[in-house]
Amino acid sequence: MTFGLIVIGDEILYGDRQDRHLAAFKQRLSARGHQLGWCWILPDEPERLIRQLAASMAAREPVFCCGGIGATPDDHTRACAAAAAGVELARHAEAAVLIEGRFGADAYPQRIRMAELPLGASLIPNPVNQVPGFGLRRHWFLPGFPTMAWPMAEWVLDRHYGRAEPVRESALEVRGAPESRLIPLMEALGPQFPALKLFSLPHLGASEAERYVLLGFRGRGGLGPAMTALRAGLDAEGLVYRERPGARP
């Protein structure tokens, strides 16, 4: 499956904190045969969050959302998720029990706010401090803290999506030709293998000897026939290439 990723927080866009979620989710998804299709980084601005969440909820793909589900005034994600889904925000009884069990009397009056969730939300267990995340409309809302978000995302993946055949990639280093020279060949080969994605990536080295275009296919299943056709096409054009080290057929 293809997933989306939304990282929420002013501290990522305007502050000193660097995003770590993009690389982590790419790794966890690919390890299970899934892939990341897109990533948004959004500020803690309710109007923008509602607009973007409504757009992604209207699509069919699942989305992970990290950040903004705490209890402080700048944590808008819970309320914005409810508004985007067109439902009310209300106290989730099971979430309240978990928060009370973790913090006791200190759950009130502030921490219990994290049990205010969109109606119809399901819970995502938090192995670190027991304050749950929640699922709604194929969106999985997690804390911004990586130590919490990543094991919670793994739980979601393993419970709801399982594993699929991994995406494989094989490519050739084409040398001595600009990327534009490869366009006719790419236009001819792409329709022959519609289940695969044909890609090109120029590498601009400091010298001519270091420059090449990485040209290949990516997808599930065997790449052998597509790569054979690619080599034949390059040979017919008299283009020089070499096998990519570590390529998997």
Image: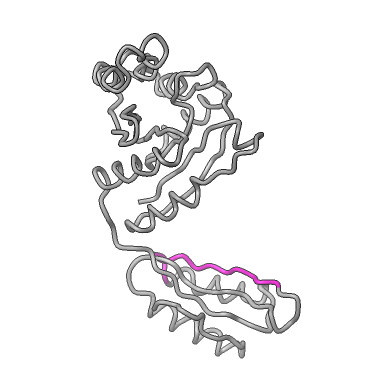
Please name the residue shown 36% across and 14% down the image: 106
- On the picture, is 101 further left or further right than 14? left
Looking at the picture, tell me which residue is in the foreground, 75 or 207. 75
What residue appears at the point 46 percent right and 71 percent down from the top-left corner?
Answer: 217
Q: Is residue 97 above or below residue 133?
A: above
Q: Is residue 133 magenta?
A: no
Q: Nearer the viewer, residue 162 or 196?
A: 162
Whether 203 is among the magenta residues is yes
The image shows residue 104 at horizontal and vertical percentages of 30, 16
Residue 37 vertical position relative to residue 74 in the rendered view, above or below: below
Question: Which image quarter: residue 176?
Answer: bottom right
Q: Which residues are magenta?
A: 193-204
Decide if residue 61 is on the left or right side of residue 202: left
Residue at image position (41%, 39%) is 64
Q: How many marks?
A: 0
Which colouring convention does the figure follow? one colour
Q: Residue furthest top?
A: 109
Answer with the quarter of the image where residue 32 lies.
bottom left
Does 68 sit above or below residue 119? below
Classify 174 as above or below 221.
below
- Nearer to the camera, 179 or 188: 179
Residue 81 in which image quadrant: top left
From the top left corner, tell me how far across and down residue 163 is, in percent.
27, 55
